[in-house]
Amino acid sequence: MPSSHLMDTYKRLPVAFESGSGATLVDTEGREYLDAVSGIAVCGLGHAHPAVTGALCEQADRLVHTSNLYGVPLQEEVGTELARLSGMDRVFFANSGAEANEAAIKLARRFGHAREIERPEIVVMQGSFHGRTLATLTATGNRKVQAGFEPLVPGFKRIPYNDLEAVERVGSESTVAVLVEPIQGEGGVVTPDPEYLAGLRRLCDEHGWLLMLDEVQTGMGRTGAWFAFQHAGIRPDVVTVAKALGNGVPVGAMLATESAASLFGPGTHATTFGGNPLAMAAVRAVLRTIEREDLVAGAAEIGTYLQDRLRETVGRREAVREIRGRGLMIGIEVEADLSGLVQRALDHGLLINVTAERVIRLLPPLILSREQADRIAEGLDYLLGEIL
């Protein structure tokens, strides 16, 4: 695909899409594909959802951007809705998940300095992914993401995921926060023990640390709850969201308790585009649609159905080690070389993703039908049959 004037930062597949509807994409040659990754968990409502399209057109016709120097009424409305749905108190709108996580890291450092900790440290996890900015790639537990960008940002201590004893072991007088994904996405759809998040909450309370959850991929109903932390019955101090928040419109947010949010004030943190009227119109349409169509419960139901179908089909193969996940965030770990599988799936009219080298990652839209779930399971079974 010619892209001579674009920086060579992506290993793109040989396809370009011209249109989409629901869980289906159509390429420039008119061929249809079933999208089982939804832009890496972005298009939770599917492609070109009429509610989002209508909201964008209407808002673009009135006002796109003003600046956070002025009041943005839609921010107030959307912030109130996100607070209601999450149980958090305050919202800071950003442009992306990385920017939301960057804000969380800055908030943690400010929390430390308020306690007169000169060099505050944040506990982060092996196998995690938090973004590509310098601080968030430092927090990320993948050496490939960090290589070539040294010196990295100081102030992070890395431990194994799903290991509460390691958290206690590494904690010190300089520790100010724990930053963790409730389910690791890029790391291979790694689900923790049921008591893990509650254990982190307890440790943070005991030591006076902030519990900060990266829900950039797990948020907005994907796991069968509005936010994955709600499965654990806890309330974190900070939550970051993005991806499905705008159903394709770039927007992120950091949600915080009143106490944590009070660490920021006028002039301490800001963004130019974050929370502008166009993005807020998209988010409002997303939130209303998820509620109106009961898609959070729907993700739990169709996610269980898809996982059951996968166990009936691909799960019977000896090389398939585990099918795991929650709701419509599903990983299939396979003891085999999966390097050509994504291309084979593309040729078969199915869009999938492979992460952590051996894990097929499925993140279909929340509006997935049972017939489409059957096609994903049967398609993967056929494709794995070709390589195993």
Image (spheres, rainbow, N blue to C red):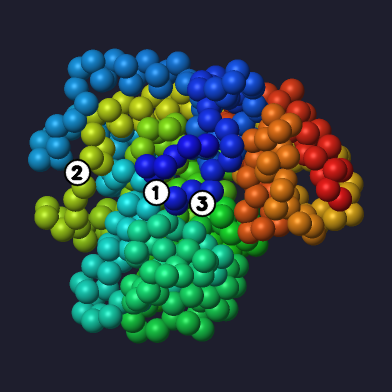
Can you say whether 82 is above or below 354 in the image? above
Secondary structure of the residue carrying numbered label 1: loop
Question: Where does label 1 land, which residue?
Answer: 7
- Residue 304 seen anywhere in this rendered image of the structure: no
- Report the Cα–Cα distance between label 1 and label 3: 38 Å
Name the mark nearer the viewer: 1 or 2: 1
Whether 247 is drawn above or below 128: the answer is above
Query: Residue 84's x, y, as percent?
Result: 37, 38
Q: Quadrant of residue 82?
A: top left
Tag shown at residue 134: none
Q: Residue at x 82, y 44 (%)?
A: 384
User: Which residue position is annotated with label 2?
Assistant: 272
Q: Nearer the viewer, mark 2 or mark 3?
A: 2
Looking at the picture, tell me which residue is in the foreground, 297 or 31. Answer: 31
The mark nearer the N terminus, 2 or 3, is 3
**Residue linked to disc 3:** 229
Amino acid type indicated by mark 3: Phe
The answer to whether residue 42 of the structure is visible from this angle is yes
Badge 2 element: loop
The amino acid type, in three-letter code, at marker 2 is Thr
Residue drawn at point x = 67 percent, y = 35 percent = 346
Q: Residue at x 43, y 32 (%)?
A: 248
Relative depth, front residue between 377 and 13: 13
In this picture, residue 306 sits left or right of residue 148? right
Q: Are marks 1 and 2 in contact (CB under 8 Å)?
A: no
Amino acid type assigned to the residue bearing label 1 in the image: Met
The Cα–Cα distance between marks 1 and 2, rounded to whole angstroms, is 24 Å
**Disc on the earlier residue, 1 or 2:** 1
Q: Give the spatial CA distance, label 2 vs label 3.
A: 30 Å
